[in-house]
Amino acid sequence: MVTPLARIRAFQPSDDKDVRFIAGKAAMEPLAAANVKVYTHPIMLAIWGGLSCIFIQYMQWWPHPDYGYLGYLLPIPGFASMAVPLMFLVDWFNRQPIEEAMQRVLHRPDLANVAAWYSRSPSSGIWILEFGDKFVGLIALDASRDATSTAPIDASQSFGKRGKKPDFPKGTGYTAVVRHFYVDEAYRAAGAQHDLLQFALKHAFESDPTVQEVKCDDSPLKGYVGEALRKAGFELEWKTDKVGILGWQNSVRTLSRGKWKPTA
């Protein structure tokens, strides 16, 4: 049996749909993490237990030893009945800001024409990590002069439709931005995210001396990304918005050229 090989390869036009899908998936991933954190929070567990006990008391579903062993299972439907609406409410309140962030990501011009956008600077690029023929992750680094822009698609511009070539300004900027960063959950324990990030950083800093720093969004709801950034030397630059019921603090981290330590 041949052992599959891991490789990092450049984006191909045939990857376009997969990249768009993964970009959306990565943007929505914090929702599941946020929900789990709320479900397991002590206050939420106390609320769930209290409401369940009230409901069980009302329904008279306390254990009845007279019914034998099955009588001790009577409270279970009461706890389940209270869990469902609470989980729905938690998802409802956590979902809105995360879905709005996903929409902003999907409506940025870099996804309108991936190949054209990431070919404007020699330090830009989008790479896919594969294990054998299986997709593992991707990272997209934008080193163009307008890399820090978060403006959505301008409807007045052409993005390669109807045979027209997209009109994207070319050149390399002082600051490069990691726009998309995702690794499949099964490969995070092996540290695949560290290899992917180091590959992108090496390309960014060595391809053009104009790039002096790399920025990346960080969120406590994407722990593996934050861990990879801190290990690579990224430092907290500023705090941005708070999301979710518990107000998780998002931030921006930056790595300067002088503090970058290339790996072998």
Image (tube, rainbow, N blue to C red):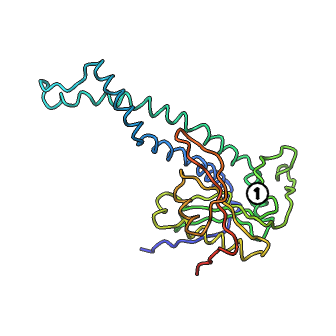
Numbered marks: total: 1
Q: Position of residue 220 (x, y in %)?
A: 54, 52
The structure residue drawn at horizontal position 80% and vertical position 72%, both measured from the top left corner, is 210
Task: Determine the image quadrant of residue 7.
Answer: bottom right
Quadrant the C terminus occupies: bottom right
The structure residue drawn at horizontal position 66% and vertical position 55%, both measured from the top left corner, is 238
- The outermost residue toward the bottom is 264
Quadrant the N terminus occupies: bottom left
Q: Position of residue 18 (x, y in %)?
A: 63, 55
Q: Position of residue 124 (x, y in %)?
A: 74, 66
Q: What residue is pinned by disc 1?
A: 148
In the image, residue 12 above or below residue 101: below
In terms of depth relative to the viewer, which is nearer, 126 or 12? 126
Task: Left or right? Give the position of 74 relative to 35.
Answer: left
| Mark 1: few/some/many CA within 10 Å (<14, 14-19, 20+) | some
The structure residue drawn at horizontal position 85% and vertical position 58%, both measured from the top left corner, is 168
In the image, residue 206 above or below residue 93: below
Q: Position of residue 248 (x, y in %)?
A: 55, 46
Task: Left or right? Give the position of 90 relative to 115.
Answer: left
In terms of depth relative to the viewer, which is nearer, 68 or 145? 145
In terms of depth relative to the viewer, which is nearer, 118 or 245? 245
Helix, strand or loop at mark 1: loop
Amino acid type of the residue that numbered disc 1 sits on in the rendered structure: Thr
